[in-house]
Image (spheres, rainbow, N blue to C red):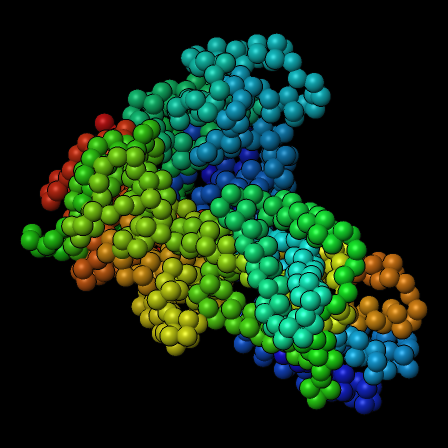
């Protein structure tokens, strides 16, 4: 789950090593992809990540390969990556959750508010209660997700509309609560997490990878995960296979909210400020990442590995643009172009798949037995 | 094919010549040639899955042939598209009729022609006379102002035929037009077909019902496994030879039914089960190890009874007992926990996850019983279940990781069957278990059911395929207009009795 570190070492050592690392990675990811049951996304994202990395290394090696830049990528990627994984999870059911970023902010604001309120009277208590306060933020995220789940599964509102509404609600509540200001302050625990590194890898990044592994296990190795996939692959057949749709959707959106809540924690760990309008551009970015990572927008198929790689690719492109002095607007253009390029690739391969799909639906004989020659009148 | 007779009759409106078509490397049509001649009913007969529908799709421009040509009025096309086919007067009336249920009969008859003429404004006053004219021409009695959703199946069919004629149809292809009709409705349809023939329309009838084939057609083509077995004047055939050509063997009406232990306990019991608008007061018992047939015409309520047992559309009234204990079935989960499994009618959309692997499909309904004590899925347990059913049911695929969409009808059905067998149900309901399945596979699937029944599973087969019921069922229930009208047992179970009781 850490191909990026390999790339970084290989590329920073000497760019001549790249092809070899590439080959090694290719086979390694292939095996990983096959092992994790993911069908698409991961392979092509390895290629995209390497291309992006090589491109910016070539354009401005001094800035792009600087330890600070690489450090930045590893620290900024986790929060986006975890929300993208949450997005992948709900998209796997054939749904979508637009409120994830709002939930993440709400979680960050809850933590900051609780911390500041307690710290106002007793700073030491606030820090010793750090873990509880952080958990409160994650629980708020779960509640937000549960509300989404309720609206989608029990009430039966189309996911895009239900979560559009809750996005507005959570966002509005956050603004009302904070009065539109930016909050400063978070438990010391989070600052520690944000600054810790294990063997040169920021702890934030390790948390990201750990979450990815857990969700990969959930998706591929648990009954719930399989049900999520089946629900997304064909909701009608899922119903006729006695898959409890409501419970599955409820849990999926709740898990999504929990991950968003965790992302809120990471916001604060990186920077102890919280505001309602943080990461507004993430809403669409995480959809781009999920789809780039091989998540089928209509549900049923996704690859956690692919989403992790897609997160890193976009982060590399983002910091690469900064390294060659392009603006965030140009980065936005690049996001759109990358998404369309991948969609075109998908369209090509899915037309092929659809053509084959007719095989199953077209009535025909099962076994093409050689006919005993009967006379035609 | 029929070059010897062409000179005697008008030239064909449409001909298909040497059509080849394969799907994913499996041939669906092999060198098929057919002519539709004005004033003639050409019957296309063959078992489910023999390639009839594919041929229709190619003639009507929905599918493109791999090779061969379509001749319209003698002009050759390597393929045509659906619009061009309609413009040249080729109309297909599918089993679902493709009508707009929310529009009136008159609107349905006229609207597509108006659209085809690129009229931008629609005026009810101006189109009505056209609809009336068609009805008068054909001597039909249809209420033009009723909404199509309120019509009976037969009247919907008439509406579809009228629509075809308004579109200047010169060749009308009807796909299984009599499946859902009663006897008197069939005769009414046949009378209309005669009038169409007199007007010089070329007709193609797709059917697998032998008496109909003999009664209505002048020319007959029989297909089997994608090949055109024989084409000739209908007078050259009789029921026996048709069925011989269709199946490639003598019809096997033999019953292979095990002796049922008379003291076997009831696995399932229905007491006065009713669902408004679908069926009323259905009561019967099903013994352990019994295979029970439930038959009736399309829309008789046979499918609704099965779907109520499976919790899709729960019954309003009455009681269901499984193994003697009353159960409440309000949802599919209720049914499955009560030990009921259901192989649905529409295998492709309801039964299977087409894009998922065979393996994923097999364990789809039994995931919870494959858990380790950590709550994760046990790879070993799953692998052994998959291996057991993949080999046990002889699913013909390279390996269990292949997506289900690559499978043929018979193999896909085995996957659905495997999915339910993996839940070890007390009662397994199967709706049209061998629809779209070839003859060989059909026998094997029935044999699988016999084996499972012998092991103690109770089976309900919902089907209108009389030979299949005869060959496998201990008893056959006949449902008519939502009521259980006959229970056939022992020697009463013959193809003739079943068909007669079904439609009388």
Counting from the top left corner in percent of width and height, residue A216 is at 55, 71
In this picture, residue B220 sits left or right of residue B12: left
Residue at 60% over, 59% down: A140
| Residue A216 left/right relative to B327 | right
Q: Residue at x 66, y 17 (%)?
A: B122
B213 or B232: nearer the viewer: B213
Reply above or below: B89 against B312.
Answer: above
Residue B98: horizontal and vertical position, in percent? 51, 32
Question: For residue A86, which quarter of the picture?
Answer: bottom right
Where residue B296 sits: x, y (%)?
Answer: 27, 35
Question: B287 above or below B231?
Answer: below
User: Within the image, what quadrant is residue B295 found in?
Assistant: top left
The extreme left residue here reads: B263
* Residue ID at (63%, 29%): B87
Residue lying farthest right? Answer: A325
Q: Residue at x 62, y 53 (%)?
A: A96
């Amino acid at each position: 789950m850490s191909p990026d570190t390999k790339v970084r070492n290989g590329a920073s050592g000497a760019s001549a090593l790249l092809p070899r690392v590439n080959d090694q990675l290719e086979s390694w990811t292939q095996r990983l992809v096959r092992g994790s049951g993911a069908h698409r996304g991961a392979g092509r994202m390895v290629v995209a990540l390497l291309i992006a990395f090589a491109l910016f290394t070539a354009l401005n090696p001094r800035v792009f390969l600087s330890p600070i830049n690489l450090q930045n990528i590893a620290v900024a990627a986790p929060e986006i990556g975890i929300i993208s994984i949450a997005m992948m999870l709900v998209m796997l059911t054939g749904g979508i959750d637009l409120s994830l970023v709002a939930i993440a902010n709400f979680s960050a604001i809850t933590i900051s508010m609780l911390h500041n309120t307690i710290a106002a009277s007793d700073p030491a208590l606030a820090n010793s209660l750090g873990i509880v306060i952080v958990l409160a933020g994650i629980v708020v995220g779960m509640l937000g997700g549960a509300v989404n789940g309720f609206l989608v599964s029990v009430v039966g509102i189309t996911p895009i509309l239900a979560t559009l509404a809750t996005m507005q609600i959570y966002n509005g509540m956050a603004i009302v609560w904070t009065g539109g200001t930016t909050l400063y302050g978070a438990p010391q625990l989070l600052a520690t997490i944000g600054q810790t590194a294990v063997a040169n890898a920021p702890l934030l990044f390790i948390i990201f990878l750990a979450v990815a592994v857990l969700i990969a296990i959930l998706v591929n190795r648990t009954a719930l995960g399989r049900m999520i996939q089946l629900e997304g692959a064909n909701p009608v057949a899922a119903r006729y296979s006695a898959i409890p749709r409501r419970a599955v959707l409820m849990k999926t959106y709740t898990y999504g909210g929990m991950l968003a809540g965790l992302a809120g924690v990471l916001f604060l760990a990186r920077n102890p400020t919280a505001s309602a309008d943080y990461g507004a551009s993430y809403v669409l970015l995480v959809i781009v990442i999920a789809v780039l990572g091989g998540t089928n927008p209509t549900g049923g198929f996704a690859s956690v590995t692919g989403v992790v790689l897609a997160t890193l690719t976009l982060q590399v492109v983002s910091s690469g643009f900064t390294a060659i002095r392009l603006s965030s607007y140009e980065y936005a253009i690049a996001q759109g172009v990358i998404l369309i390029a991948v969609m075109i690739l998908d369209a090509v391969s899915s037309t092929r798949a659809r053509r084959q799909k007719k095989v199953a639906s077209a009535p025909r004989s099962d076994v093409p037995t050689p006919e005993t020659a009967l006379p035609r009148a | 094919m029929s070059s010897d007779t062409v000179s005697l009759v008008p030239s064909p409106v449409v001909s298909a010549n040497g059509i080849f078509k394969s799907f994913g490397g499996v041939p669906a049509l092999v060198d098929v040639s057919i002519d539709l001649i004005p004033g003639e009913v050409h019957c296309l007969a063959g078992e489910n899955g023999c390639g009839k529908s594919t041929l229709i799709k190619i003639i009507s421009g929905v599918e493109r042939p791999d090779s061969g040509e379509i001749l319209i009025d003698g002009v050759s096309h390597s393929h045509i598209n659906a619009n061009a086919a309609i413009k040249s007067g080729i109309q297909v009336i599918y089993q679902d009729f493709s009508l707009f249920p929310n529009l009136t009969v008159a609107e349905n008859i006229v609207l597509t022609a108006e659209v085809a003429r690129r009229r931008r404004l629609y005026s009810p006053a101006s189109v009505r006379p056209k609809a009336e004219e068609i009805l008068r021409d054909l001597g039909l009695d249809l209420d033009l102002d009723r909404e199509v959703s309120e019509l009976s199946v037969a009247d919907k069919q008439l509406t579809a035929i009228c629509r075809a004629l308004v579109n200047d149809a010169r060749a009308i292809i009807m796909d299984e037009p009599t499946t859902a009709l009663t006897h008197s409705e069939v005769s009414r349809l046949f009378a209309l077909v005669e009038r169409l023939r007199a007007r010089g329309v070329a007709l193609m009838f797709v059917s697998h019902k032998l008496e109909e084939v003999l009664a209505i057609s002048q020319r007959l083509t029989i297909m089997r496994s994608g090949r055109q077995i024989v084409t000739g004047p209908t007078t050259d055939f009789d029921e026996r030879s048709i069925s011989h050509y269709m199946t490639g063997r003598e019809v096997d009406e033999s019953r292979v039914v095990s002796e049922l232990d008379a003291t076997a306990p009831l696995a399932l019991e229905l007491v006065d089960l009713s669902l408004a608008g679908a069926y009323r007061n259905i009561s019967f018992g099903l013994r352990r190890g019994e295979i029970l047939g439930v038959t009736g015409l399309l829309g008789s309520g046979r499918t609704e009874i099965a779907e109520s047992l499976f919790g899709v559309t729960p019954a309003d009234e009455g009681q269901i007992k499984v193994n003697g204990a009353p159960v409440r079935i309000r949802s599919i989960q209720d049914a499955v926990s009560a030990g009921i499994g259901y192989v649905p009618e529409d295998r492709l959309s309801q039964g299977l996850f087409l894009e998922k692997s065979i393996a994923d499909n097999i364990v789809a309904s039994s995931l919870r019983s494959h858990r380790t004590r950590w709550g994760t899925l046990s790879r070993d347990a799953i692998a052994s279940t998959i291996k057991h059913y993949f080999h046990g049911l002889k699913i013909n695929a390279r390996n269990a990781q292949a997506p289900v969409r690559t499978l043929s009808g018979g193999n896909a059905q085995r996957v659905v069957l495997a999915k339910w067998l993996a839940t070890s149900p007390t009662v397994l309901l199967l709706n049209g278990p061998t629809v779209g399945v070839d003859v060989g596979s059909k026998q094997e699937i029935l044999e699988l059911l016999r084996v499972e029944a012998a092991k103690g599973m109770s089976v309900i087969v919902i089907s209108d395929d009389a030979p299949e019921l005869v060959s496998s069922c201990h008893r056959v229930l006949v449902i008519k207009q939502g009521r259980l009208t006959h229970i056939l047992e022992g020697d009463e179970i013959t193809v003739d009795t079943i068909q007669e009781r079904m439609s009388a």
